[in-house]
Image: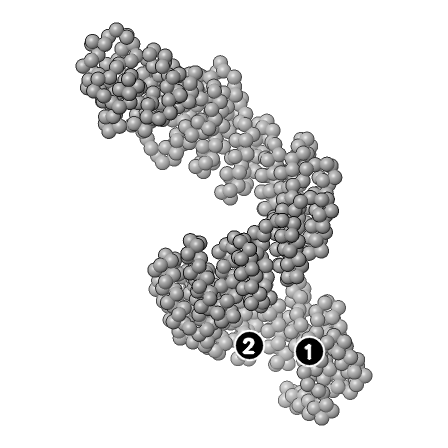
């Protein structure tokens, strides 16, 4: 009855002094439900008078009758002075020193009811929590304080520095670890709300007081800094921790090593790794794995594998993830044979492979175009009872799609779906794209509806895939209708990628005016074109020999602050080359280099070809040697242009030297290259060399696209002689 009357807020309540609260607190600690000690205390605190005497019931009845605990939630207790309230609450909190959980609950409910805690109440509770080591409750309490400070909430007027000073006095007779718990909670709270400077200031503050934070708190702060891109600050904090005597553990070293490796600072990462060894933390698998992964990310997978073998040789436990990391590293470096060796090493050890290891090997095979090997590993994986993941299936489907095997994409998708394997949104998009390329857009639309029925998350990529499918069929209206559905029903915003795709599709069917309509509509919608969008229109204008329009777009993008890329310049120069304006093209070419952009092999080849067409052979060769000095490997087209022009100018020895150079560099001649050199040999009457060249072509499976008859050779020779005369 006592508890019921208090909890339900009856008109007649029993008035209990602090001593009585203390006697019943232990029983109330187990009360889970509607009955709360906090409500009882709130009822007491809301009264205008206060007594610690059990016998003063008669004098208290009038005040008790007017006291309603529920009213405390809707109005302030003006009948009590703030100092009196604080004194009573601190007294209650101190009485609950043996029950910190109940004290915490009482504190929180007072706050929810509107009471403004101050330095005294916070100090009383924090001291209790510190002594009992209730770190999570300390974390929550300080996070509330820090959040209030960050949001510039001025009530209650409480300075955290004053609280720390008070705690230092309260806990000075306690074991130092009690106070450290408060410091740890505050550091973590600052880090959680990105108040990193305050967290670092606190580190110096506690150092001056002769305390050292716990290593887990140090790790937490460093991790938060790294996640927010403050790598340099994180490294400075790490060094500060070491300076003040915090001993890093394996996780600390792992965080720092991984961060340095991501920055590409492998030497610094190695120093930390060696420092870890010197500190005797050689058993940390997580730190080893971090360094191995860092080496692999920086294309040092061979070193990473050596380190993995060393760790394994020391009879340390190496998890499968480390092997998966090395396999991925080798695959990213396109060292498929080495990746296979690591994979086989795992099998030889008799370790049970998981989906992660299998997946990395399959992904590597798919990336390198080794489809059959990828399918073989997938079959081996399923036969060993390891279920394929949607990530693995998407790798297979993407590889098939890249190889143009669109029908196989559809078949594989259906096969794995029938096996009950969960296929995610990525898999669906790949197969939708394959169906569109097969001209089966209606089936792709059915898959989109299937995704909706399964409540899968549709994004703009799924819609744009279908829109592109409609465009491939020439059904522009269908594409526009789907775009409207995407906006209205899908709630998705059309972005620059969508508009670029539509512009590209109109350009593809030579509807430049429609492409411009989309371009202007996009800008009216407030979406600014990016460099890819500009490139599509510039390329189309150049292709249509509308250089004025192309350069107008170029000026517009510069004015908007959109930085042109190599494709932009290549398109513009291509249009200039087509008009035969070599001088203007060269000015543009030099301007690219001045901007710090290195021309690619395509641009060099176009420039070389332009010089060759006007018989400026020296300039062409200068560019040829310049691209080699810059480390740009000439391709088969570039070599063929020079070989053909040498043959035309009766400079057969130079043509042969270029042919030999390209084969030595691993550039494989094609039918056009062979024909250019072959006709040069015939023109010189070198039938023997011509016969050897034809035999070489035949052995490589490269045959002339038409027979070379003596009459044909005679006509060709006459044409070339006339070209030489006209060029002079």
Number of marks in the rendered image? 2
For numbered disc 2, what is the local secondary structure? helix
The image quadrant of residue 525 is: bottom left
Q: Is residue 553 left or right of residue 585?
A: left
Toward the right, the furthest residue is: 688
Toward the top, the furthest residue is: 55
Q: Is residue 111 above or below residue 715?
A: above
Badge 2 or badge 1: first in the primary sequence:
2
Q: Is residue 98 above or below residue 311?
A: above
Decide which of 280, 336 is in the foreground and name it: 336
Q: Is residue 497 left or right of residue 377?
A: left
Q: Is residue 119 above or below residue 373?
A: above
Q: Position of residue 104 (x, y in %)?
A: 39, 23
Q: Position of residue 436 (x, y in %)?
A: 49, 68
Q: Position of residue 461 (x, y in %)?
A: 46, 60
Q: Is residue 455 above or below residue 407?
A: above
Mark 1 neighbour class, 10 Å CA radius: few under 14, some 14 to 19, many 20 or more: few
Residue in the picture at 70% in, 71% down: 668
Q: Position of residue 149 (x, y in %)?
A: 38, 32
Residue in the picture at 24% in, 17% down: 13
Q: Which residue is mark 2?
A: 577
Q: Is residue 406 at all visible to an observer of this figure?
A: yes
Q: Which mark is residue 536?
A: none
Residue in the picture at 65% in, 67% down: 627
Report the quarter where the N terminus lies: top left
Residue in the picture at 68% in, 37% down: 317
Q: Which residue is mark 1?
A: 671
Decide which of 372, 1 is in the foreground and name it: 1
The image quadrant of residue 570 is: bottom right
Task: Please state which of the two labelled residues, at mark 2 or mark 1, is closer to the viewer.
Answer: 1
Q: CA distance from mark 2 to mark 1?
A: 25 Å
Q: Are marks 2 and 1 in contact (CB under 8 Å)?
A: no
């Amino acid at each position: 009855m006592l508890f019921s009357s208090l909890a339900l807020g009856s008109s007649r309540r029993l008035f209990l002094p602090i001593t009585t609260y203390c006697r019943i607190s232990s029983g109330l600690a187990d009360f889970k439900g509607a009955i709360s000690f906090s409500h009882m205390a709130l009822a007491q605190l809301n009264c205008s008078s206060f007594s610690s005497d059990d016998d003063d019931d008669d004098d208290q009845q009038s005040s008790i009758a007017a006291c309603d605990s529920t009213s405390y939630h809707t109005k302030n207790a003006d009948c009590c002075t703030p100092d009196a309230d604080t004194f009573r609450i601190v007294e209650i909190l101190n009485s609950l020193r043996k029950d910190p959980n109940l004290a915490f609950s009482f504190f929180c409910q007072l706050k929810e009811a509107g009471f403004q805690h101050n330095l005294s109440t916070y100090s009383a509770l924090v001291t209790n929590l510190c002594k009992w080591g209730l770190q999570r409750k300390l974390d929550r309490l300080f996070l509330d304080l820090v959040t209030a400070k960050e949001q510039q909430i001025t009530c209650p007027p409480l300075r955290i520095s004053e609280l720390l000073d008070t705690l230092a006095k309260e806990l000075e007779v306690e074991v130092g670890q009690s106070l450290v718990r408060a410091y740890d909670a505050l550091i973590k709270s600052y880090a959680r709300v990105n108040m990193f400077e305050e967290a670092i200031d606190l580190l110096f503050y506690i150092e001056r007081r002769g305390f050292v934070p716990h290593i887990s708190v140090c790790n937490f702060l460093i991790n938060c800094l790294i996640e927010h891109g403050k790598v340099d600050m994180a490294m400075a904090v790490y060094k500060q921790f070491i300076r003040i005597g915090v001993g890093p553990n394996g996780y600390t070293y792992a965080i720092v090593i991984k961060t340095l490796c991501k920055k590409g600072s492998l030497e610094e990462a190695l120093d930390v790794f060696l420092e870890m060894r010197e500190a005797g933390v050689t058993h940390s698998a997580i730190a080893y794995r971090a360094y191995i992964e860092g080496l692999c990310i920086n294309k040092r997978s061979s070193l990473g594998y050596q380190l993995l073998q060393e760790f394994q040789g020391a009879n340390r436990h190496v998890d499968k993830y480390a092997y998966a990391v090395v396999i991925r590293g080798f695959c990213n470096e396109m060292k498929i044979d080495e990746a296979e060796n690591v994979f086989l090493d795992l099998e030889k050890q008799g370790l049970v492979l998981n989906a992660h290891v299998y997946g990395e090997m399959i992904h590597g095979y798919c990336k390198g175009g080794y489809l059959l090997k990828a399918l073989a590993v997938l079959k081996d994986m399923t036969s060993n009872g390891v279920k394929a993941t949607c990530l693995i299936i998407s790798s297979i489907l993407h590889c098939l799609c890249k190889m143009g095997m669109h029908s196989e994409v559809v078949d594989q998708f259906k096969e794995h779906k029938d096996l009950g394997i969960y296929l995610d949104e990525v898999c669906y998009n790949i197969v939708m794209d394959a169906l569109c390329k097969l001209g089966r857009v209606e089936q792709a639309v059915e898959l989109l509806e299937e995704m909706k029925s399964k409540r899968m998350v549709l994004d703009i990529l799924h819609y744009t895939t279908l829109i592109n499918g409609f465009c491939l069929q020439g059904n522009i209206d269908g594409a526009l209708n789907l775009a409207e559905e995407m906006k209205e029903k899908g709630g998705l915003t059309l972005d620059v990628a969508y508009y670029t795709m539509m512009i590209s599709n109109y350009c593809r069917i030579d509807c430049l005016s429609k492409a411009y309509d989309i371009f202007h509509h996009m800008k009216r919608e407030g979406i600014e074109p990016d460099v890819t969008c500009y490139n599509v229109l510039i390329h189309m204008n150049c292709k249509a020999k509308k250089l004025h329009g192309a350069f107008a777009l170029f000026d517009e993008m510069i004015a908007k602050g959109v930085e042109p890329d190599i494709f932009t310049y290549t398109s513009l120069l291509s249009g200039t080359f087509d008009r035969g304006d070599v001088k203007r093209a060269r000015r543009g070419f030099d301007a690219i280099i001045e901007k710090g952009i290195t021309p690619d092999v395509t641009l060099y080849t176009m420039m070389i070809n332009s010089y060759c067409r006007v018989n400026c052979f020296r300039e062409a060769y200068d560019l040829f040697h310049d691209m080699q000095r810059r480390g740009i490997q000439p391709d088969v087209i570039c070599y063929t242009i020079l070989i053909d022009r040498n043959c035309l100018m009766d400079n057969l020895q130079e043509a042969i030297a270029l042919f030999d150079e390209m084969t030595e560099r691993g550039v494989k001649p094609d039918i056009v290259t062979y024909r250019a050199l072959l006709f040069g040999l015939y023109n010189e009457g070198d039938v023997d060399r011509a016969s050897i060249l034809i035999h070489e072509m035949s052995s490589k499976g490269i045959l002339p696209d038409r027979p070379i008859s003596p009459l044909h050779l005679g006509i060709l020779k006459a044409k070339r002689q006339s070209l030489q005369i006209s060029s002079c």
